[in-house]
Amino acid sequence: MTSLMHVMQLVDFGDPDTAFTLTEVPRPTPGPGQILVRVEATSVNPLDLQTRRGDYRDQVTLPTVIGNDVSGVVVETGPGADDFQSGDEVWYLAPIFAGQGTYAEYHVVDQTLVARKPAGLTHVEAAGLALVGVTVWEALVERTRLQVGERVLVHGGAGGVGSAAIQLASALGAEVVTTARARDHEFVTQLGADHTIDFSAGDYTPQIRAMGGADVVLDTVGRDTLTRSPDILADRGRVVSIVDTTEPQNLLAAWDTNATYHFLFVSPGRAKLQALGRLVDQGRIRPVIGAALPLADIAQAHTLLEGGSTGEGRRRPRGKIAIALNL
């Protein structure tokens, strides 16, 4: 008889309370070069919210399983998958819009995308770092090539991506400025931010200009952050955005500063995970987990990430919201 597994299926676009159904489906079998992983933890990302709302409905056929972070244990290997063996603890970022997602008890993945989990991280912590960690590595190291002594502005420093970006930028030797609400300033300072700005208190651009401008801007927010970026860039500054936006862009001003723009849709990779793992081992990066919920509470996790109330008056947690399969 075919082995079954529990998955949280996205069955309709829209409200989180009606979009998901917990159900059973056949457990996948690894093909050539693939491994089967028992998912110990995954996490919820803004991409998941956008997919659930229907922003990418052309990329998604319902019903489907979404999610992209995994930390877990190898239980089976396919032909030619010799890099791992049963019992290995691994973590990875699953390909986006390609195959089954990670809101599931088991997941099949190409072994080339997988790395061994850092020993110092729990599965929940590793799952909370996979997508955001790879994103900020690609943004700050591969795209903008952030250098020692440069000034970087990280928008949304208390969020999942922002909290990882502050730590990575600090580890790279940069001067870190971040926007966050006043209540989160102590938190982001502890992560490594050198300067904090309350974005809700008004226009932040004069403060950045008074510092001499930013060499790099990491946009994790969207809205008008890209439009304002040329006003705060130092000469030959770089901007990298991980948010799709319909806001008009101030590109003439960007041209005047010799600016370079990068628009990032993250791609998985073992080398990036290994580099992050070394920083974890050195104590330079630590995942920030704001909440950990069971798979059955995916709707609540989506509501929390969107900043809504759960009925207990809780606001959006700092850092990442993880899903632990053994809760």
Image: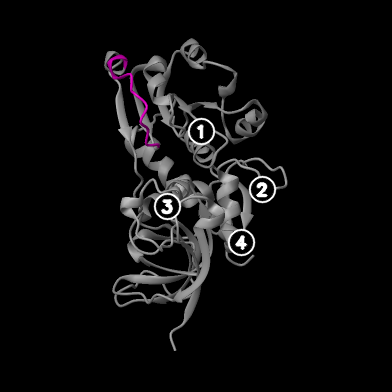
Describe the element under mark 1 as helix, strand or loop: helix
Magenta: main secondary structure equals loop
Quick one: label 3, few (<14), some, or many (20+) residues within 10 Å? many
Per the model, the C-alpha gap separating discs 3 and 2 is: 33 Å
Residue type marked 1: Ser
Residue at position x 35%, y 33% from top?
145
Q: Quadrant of the N terminus?
A: bottom left
Q: Which mark is residue 310?
A: 2
Determine whether the residue tagged by mark 3 lies in a helix, strand or loop. helix
Is residue 136 rendered to the left or right of residue 319?
Answer: left
- Name which residue type carries label 4: Pro
Tell me which label, 4 or 1, sits earlier in the chain. Answer: 1
- Residues at discs 4 and 3 in contact (Cβ within 8 Å): no
> Which residue corresponds to mark 1?
170
Residue occupying image coordinates x 60% and y 18% = 201
Which label's residue is closer to the chain start, 3 or 1?
A: 1
Three-letter residue code for mark 3: Leu
Mark in the foreground, 2 or 1: 2
Specify which label sits upstream in the sequence, 3 or 2.
Answer: 3
Numbered tag placed on residue 273 in the rendering:
3
Q: Are the two marked residues, 2 and 1, in contact with CB atoms closer than 8 angstroms?
A: no
Q: What secondary structure is marked by label 4?
A: loop
Q: Nearer the N terminus, badge 4 or badge 3? A: 3
> Disc 4 marks which residue?
294
At 32% across and 35% down in the image, what residue appears? 263
Residue type, mark 2 in image: Thr
Residue 196 belongs to magenta span: no
Nearer-N-terminus badge (2/1): 1
